[in-house]
């Protein structure tokens, strides 16, 4: 009996040693955790992306509308940008002989973070046939008044006749005698032959307003009147404006504005 117990104890010891040796020789593999694919945390102070800035043209004055080769009718509308002394420039139109048909002094409006923008309308009697002309925009030297920073657009002015146009005073006329009369005349095709002529200062304030009649209603015919320049008219630029009122809603329509200079 004692002998059997010794043999069993011996077998248990051998089995324990075998398990221990097996564990030491072949330890279990330990695999590292899988890599994380989460996005890195954002920087506490990210660098902002630069705001795209349009390439400047490098021209102090531009005429954006109309473009070269355009066909336009009277009154001619222009638009562009300017970087000039006191934001002032001159816009005009010249015929093929190089004579100025109409000119207007313009003040550009300061844009928000953009170049100064300007708009102008050149009003003159329409030609009898489609006629090539040149639109110009330029500044005048503060030193000697010479033309500088000139830009041009070659266009065709059509023979289309506006509902109202002035033949007097002409665009760019100079008035020198406050208190005296000046002639306003032109042609119009307006409802019931009725139109209005005003003298407005540079701020748009009406200094004179006169209701006129054409010779014939609802078809093109002549109109004329003498207006008196107010005695208290100060030197400066003014607009002589002819227009009619809409029969539908009473709004002003068909404006034709000629810029003149009062220089007592």
Image (cartoon, grey):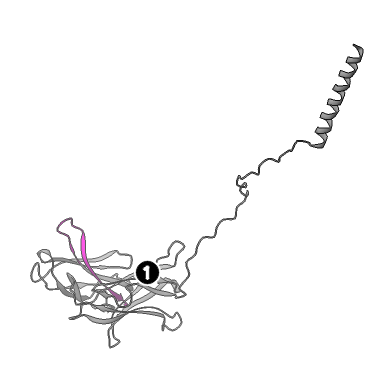
Q: Who is closer to the viewer here, 4 or 110?
A: 4
Quarter of the N terminus within the rendering: top right
Query: Residue 149: percent from the left, percent from the top?
Result: 42, 79
Look at mark 1 in the image and give the residue it sits on. Answer: 118
Circle 1 SS class = strand
Query: Residue 80: percent from the left, percent from the top?
Result: 37, 71
Query: Residue 233: percent from the left, percent from the top?
Result: 29, 70
Please give the name of the residue rendered at 30% of the width and 68% of the height, measured from the top-left corner: 201
- The magenta-colored residue range is 243-264
Work out whether 190 lies above or below 48.
below
Please give the name of the residue rendered at 47% of the width and 71% of the height, measured from the top-left corner: 56
Outermost residue on the bottom side: it is 97
- Residue 15 visible (yes or no): yes
Residue 78 highlighted magenta (yes or no): no
User: Is residue 245 rendered to the left or right of residue 104?
Assistant: left
How many residues crowd around disc 1 within 10 Å: few (fewer than 14), some, or many (20 or more)?
Answer: many
Query: Residue 163: percent from the left, percent from the top?
Result: 17, 69
User: Is residue 83 rendered to the left or right of residue 207?
Assistant: right
Q: Who is closer to the viewer here, 166 or 58?
A: 58
């Amino acid at each position: 009996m004692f002998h059997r117990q010794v043999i069993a104890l011996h077998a248990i010891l051998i089995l324990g040693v075998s398990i221990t040796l097996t564990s030491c020789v072949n330890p279990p593999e330990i695999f590292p955790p899988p890599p994380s694919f989460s996005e890195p945390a954002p920087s506490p102070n990210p660098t902002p992306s630069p705001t795209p800035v349009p390439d400047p043209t490098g021209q102090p004055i531009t005429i954006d509308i109309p473009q070269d080769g355009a066909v336009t009718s009277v009154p001619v509308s222009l638009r562009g940008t300017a970087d000039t002394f006191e934001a002032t420039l001159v816009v005009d139109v010249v015929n093929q002989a190089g004579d100025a048909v109409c000119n207007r002094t313009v003040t550009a409006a300061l844009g928000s973070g953009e170049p100064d923008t300007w708009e102008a309308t050149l009003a003159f009697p329409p030609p009898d046939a489609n006629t090539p002309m040149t639109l110009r925009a330029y500044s005048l030297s503060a030193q000697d008044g010479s033309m500088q920073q000139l830009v041009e657009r070659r266009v065709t002015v059509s023979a289309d006749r506006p509902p109202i146009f002035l033949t007097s005073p002409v665009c760019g006329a100079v008035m020198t005698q406050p208190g005296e009369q000046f002639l306003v005349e032109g042609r119009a095709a307006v409802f019931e032959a009725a139109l209005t002529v005003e003298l407005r200062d540079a701020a748009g304030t009406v200094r004179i307003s006169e209701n006129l009649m054409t010779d014939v209603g609802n078809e093109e015919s002549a109109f004329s009147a003498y207006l008196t320049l107010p005695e208290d008219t100060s030197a400066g630029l003014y607009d002589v404006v002819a227009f009619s009122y809409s029969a539908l809603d009473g709004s002003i329509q068909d404006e034709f504005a000629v810029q003149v200079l009062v220089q007592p």
